[in-house]
Image: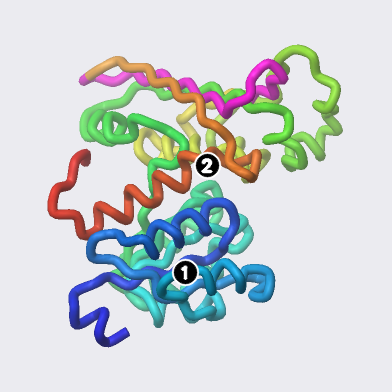
């Protein structure tokens, strides 16, 4: 690790090797300018040992709270319930934490103050959305409203707390059903694995209480579909994206690619986008 620091490389650790974490680990192992994968944390090391051994430079397996010792950037790719256990030790050590389960950040927002006090950083990738650059820019001026409509295939919504608590049967739907309409903060509680996009959008713009979202279960779509409308003093714009689900139907393929793009920016000679 001293050799890597001496060579100016940033050390990266990954918490969780699911559909997102394995793609990020593979990309780092294949080579990202100025970065190296040094450590991972997984719940069941035996399950992931073959994958880890297949990498050219296999990382060390460490407990969650030790990732910040082994890396400059800790990437959270775990269930949102694990967010605090991953991010807190990292930012306390002045490290950067890349947060994928950004919905979980709303209930742990004191981590931002903790990072500030210790010289750490919390980085939220664009994830399954597009256009957060435009929202960030518009927020320098005045944004009047942000509205989002999310439509997901049935499999991507199964088990969501909102659906379970309200005994909603989505298995036999033949036409789209609006499940929820309200703030991004409330949506994050009801759909913690589904609306990280809405929370990222809210943090880029006018906050989780003013950002409005609809969540639809839609048997007519095979992709995770997001439509956003923004009204601001500088511009009016709309965005739409249809993401192909990954092996995990709750997560789009583009989410992992978004994290890889963010990591590339950390040491890239040419950086495009704000």
Residue furthest toward the bottom?
Answer: 2
Q: Residue at 47%, 66% (x, y): give it.
A: 14
The local secondary structure at tag 2 comes to: helix
Q: Quadrant of the N terminus?
A: bottom left
Q: Residue at 21%, 39% (x, y): give it.
A: 273
Does the magenta stretch mainly form a helix, a strand or a loop? strand
Q: Earlier in the sequence, mark 1 or mark 2?
A: 1
Residue furthest toward the left?
Answer: 269
Question: Bounds of the magenta span?
Answer: 215-234
Q: Residue 156, position in %: x, y? A: 68, 35
Q: Nearer the viewer, residue 135 or 273?
A: 273
Q: Quadrant of the C terminus?
A: top left
Query: Do we see residue 52 in this rendering?
Result: yes
Q: Residue 200, position in %: x, y? A: 43, 41
Q: Residue 78, position in %: x, y? A: 58, 59
Q: Which mark is residue 196?
A: 2
Mark 1 or 2, which is nearer the eye? 1
95 drawn magenta: no
> Dot 1: within a 10 Å radius of its alpha carbon, few (fewer than 14), some, or many (20 or more) residues?
some
Kindly report the distance in space between the C-alpha atoms of the residues bearing marks 1 and 2: 29 Å
Q: Which mark is residue 55?
A: 1
Q: Nearer the viewer, residue 47 or 151?
A: 47
Q: Residue at 54%, 22% (x, y): give it.
A: 149
> Dot 2: within a 10 Å radius of its alpha carbon, few (fewer than 14), some, or many (20 or more) residues?
many
Label 1 close to label 2 by CB (< 8 Å): no
Side of 217 where 26 appears, left or right: left
Side of 108 where 192 appears, left or right: right
Q: Quadrant of residue 145?
A: top left
Q: Residue 93, position in %: x, y? A: 36, 78
Q: Is residue 41 above or below residue 169?
A: below
Side of 8 where 169 appears, left or right: right
Side of 37 where 47 appears, left or right: right
């Amino acid at each position: 690790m001293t050799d890597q620091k001496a060579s100016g490389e940033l050390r990266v650790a990954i918490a969780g090797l699911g559909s997102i974490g394995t793609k990020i680990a593979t990309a780092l192992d294949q080579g990202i300018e100025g970065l190296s994968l040094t450590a991972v944390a997984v719940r069941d090391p035996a399950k992931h040992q073959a994958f880890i051994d297949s990498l050219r430079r296999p990382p060390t397996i460490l407990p969650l709270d030790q990732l910040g010792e082994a890396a400059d950037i800790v990437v959270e790719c775990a269930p949102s319930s694990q967010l605090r256990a991953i991010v807190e030790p990292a930012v306390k050590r002045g490290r950067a934490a890349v947060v994928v389960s950004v919905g979980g950040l709303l209930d742990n927002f004191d981590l931002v103050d903790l990072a500030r006090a210790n010289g750490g950083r919390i980085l939220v990738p664009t994830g399954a959305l597009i256009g957060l650059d435009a929202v960030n820019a518009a927020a320098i001026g005045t944004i009047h409203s942000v509205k989002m409509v999310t439509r997901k295939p049935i499999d991507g919504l199964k088990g969501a707390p909102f659906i379970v608590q309200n005994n909603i049967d989505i298995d036999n739907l033949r036409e789209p059903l609006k499940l929820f309409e309200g703030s991004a903060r409330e949506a994050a509680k009801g759909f913690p694995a589904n609306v990280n996009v809405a929370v990222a959008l809210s943090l880029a713009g006018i906050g989780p209480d003013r950002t409005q979202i609809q969540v639809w279960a839609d048997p007519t779509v095979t992709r995770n579909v997001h439509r956003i409308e923004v009204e601001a003093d500088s511009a009016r714009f709309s965005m739409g994206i249809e993401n192909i689900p990954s092996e995990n139907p709750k997560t789009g393929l583009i989410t992992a690619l978004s994290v890889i793009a963010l990591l590339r920016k950390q040491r890239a000679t040419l950086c495009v986008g704000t």
